[in-house]
Image (cartoon, rainbow, N blue to C red):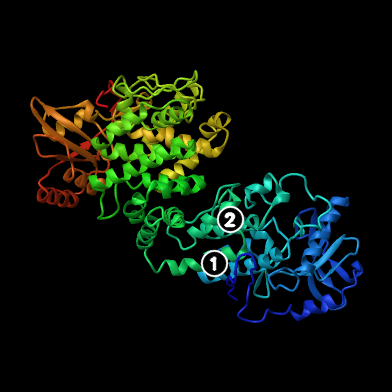
Amino acid sequence: MRITASGSSQHQTVPSAEPWPALPSEYEVVRRAARGDRKDYALDRLPIGEGGQAKIFNAIHKPSGTAVVVKKRTSMGDRGQRRMRREIEAAQALGSNPHVMPVLDFDPSYQWFVMPCAEATAEQRRADLQVPEKLRAFVDAVASALAEAHRTGWLHRDIKPSNILLLDGYWRLADWGIVRRPRGHTTELITKERIGTEEFAAPELSVTPHEATPASDLYSLGQVIGWVLTGGTPRANIPLLPAPGHSWYGVIRRLTQLDPLERPQDIAAFLALVDREPTSRTEPPPVRAKALLSSAATGDQSAGHQLIALAADEPEDYGVYIDALAGLSVESAGPALARNSPQADVVLRALAKHTMGKGSRQNSPADADRVMSWLFSVIIYAEQRHRWQLLDEAMRALCRWDAAFDRRSQRATMRDWLGTLSGQAAAVVAAVLRDQPDSAMLIRSLARGTSAHVEGPTAMVVPEDQGDSSSPTADTSDLPHQRRTPGSGLPDALRRNVLTLLYQQAEELGWIELSVAAKSELYNRWTADPVVGGLLLPYLGSEHRVRTWIKDAAMLHFLKALEGRGPTAAFVPRAFRGINEIAVAACGADWSVDPESVALNPDRFIAINGEKSCLVIWGSRRNFRHLLWAAMNAEHEVTEAPVIVVTSYRNDPVSPADHAKQEAIAQRSGIHLVQLVRDLHQRPAPDHGR
């Protein structure tokens, strides 16, 4: 049975395309014979389940011989009685709905009640529910139960897979024990603090559970759908999202917003959102994005909000971001981003990952200028309105683009603005720059004299990264800040020991050649390792922060450390010979690296020999397409043709076929190509090339 939204969200109905099914006849017999007498039921000696202050037994209804289930209260206090009474009352009030598990009989003093034997729980049928048609039927069933409940003022507050049961081919919502009754009916509190199952419960249920709304139940439903699709283990307040681009991604993302006001507010709004998904996908996201951009340009404020939401739903769609989002005026983009911080974080982090383009579409210098100008406008908006989280994320995205393109056209405006900062704004910016050492323009501007004064005693260092990079604590700027950078609270000895261990294991496991999935699994393994995550946890506070520190503070710098560069170079057991090795391979023994020119994404520098200069771009064979694009679109003023150096390693050389193919492409492009096989050596003296 498919249900759809009908009418306004204020007066929702859930029409059915077919009559609702009657309860199986054997259970109708039990219900008609119900008289609240425990002697009518023969219970098995051992329970089949336990929870919610009750035990569940298989039983036989003696007069009819029908197999049923009896839920028997274990708590004899008033609280347990109230809980069971509510569960019975809710089932009676909603019993006409086929997607609510019915109560067939119950004890007048609320010691036990009887319900049908379910065939399975959703927990047991997750694999089946991953079939699209079955998942939609499942969602429709739960939505039907909730629509009826919400219409009459009941809130479930404990939606999870084990509480959704399959009976006679229909999914039915059960266990209404912590339901919130309609307003005006509730006279006693069932619980004082957290309500619901933490992994599936909405965040507000742990703070103000008695002020829950239908949006609280919808959050839990979103977590259940995410649990079905991802196969992942749910965690409190962390949405279970399928991969971006999945047909349910946008629905789940909106259902699981941490702010209840950012979710659909009722079942009608939820169903309308679900029903839009298949239709909207007949029109490519970039086309929809450009249409919204055009509407926003005419002053339609809602179009700007919709474009931001579309970008959050399509984080991997290059066209949405580069061709549409970057053209949205800050008057439209700013309020939409500031209104919903989690959504803004998704959008800005996704934009930061689009620096390399996608497929055959690569970013041009004009694309980079447009994106960086847009990000700067968002930064100004956030700084002027004291939206510090938005300022933080927009600055991080800008740093990523700056590191990739190093656009001179953006420098003067940014430098002037940096010089005006003080107080909290300067603290936020300084902390971001400390975390983003690969940003060429911004950090060098600061290191060369931009004065951003911050009131407060704590010193923030922004490394120019041109001194002795072998020292993990080398500081070259005195720009203050008021915010601690990730992992800065770790004792020095612990940090050194953990970095040494991580880098030793990374080298032994062949980190350079590992896939993204393999690296992700390794992050998880290290997080769970008592001698890594176990030592970091007391200082970082949660496993999520431990994993983030390992990924973004430790392993982010590993490849630079192998080159003898960066803040953690001292901790690698072995390293390459440094980027001067690249310069010699590319141009010859008389050439050296201009340290002012070193940049990343892709790795590149200017090699010099007297009056001669040459752009050298280097990386692994897997990145050859990006290297080629960067060489063809370089704007550096040099005397020689650019050189691409394709690096490989002794245990994983480039095949002759790949070598020949790359050589032919480079020749047609007028670019010199060099293949360099590299070895790790005992760590040399620091290379000051960066």
Specify whether 49 is left or right of 285: right
Q: Nearer the viewer, residue 353 or 521?
A: 353
Q: CA distance from mark 2 to mark 1?
A: 18 Å
Q: Which residue is mark 1?
A: 272
What residue is drawn where x is 69% and y is 79%? 21
Q: Earlier in the sequence, mark 2 or mark 1?
A: 2
In this rendered view, identify the residue nearer to me: 626 or 3.
3
Q: Is residue 54 visible?
A: yes
The type of residue carrying mark 2 is Gln
Q: Position of residue 324 (x, y in %)?
A: 34, 54
Image quadrant in which the C terminus is located: top left
377 sits to left or right of 41:
left
Residue 223, numbered circle: 2
What is the three-letter code of the residue carrying label 1? Ala
Q: Quadrant of the N terminus?
A: bottom right
Displayed quadrant of residue 303: bottom left
In this rendering, the answer to whether 410 lies above or below 25 is: above
x, y percentage for residue 98?
Answer: 70, 73
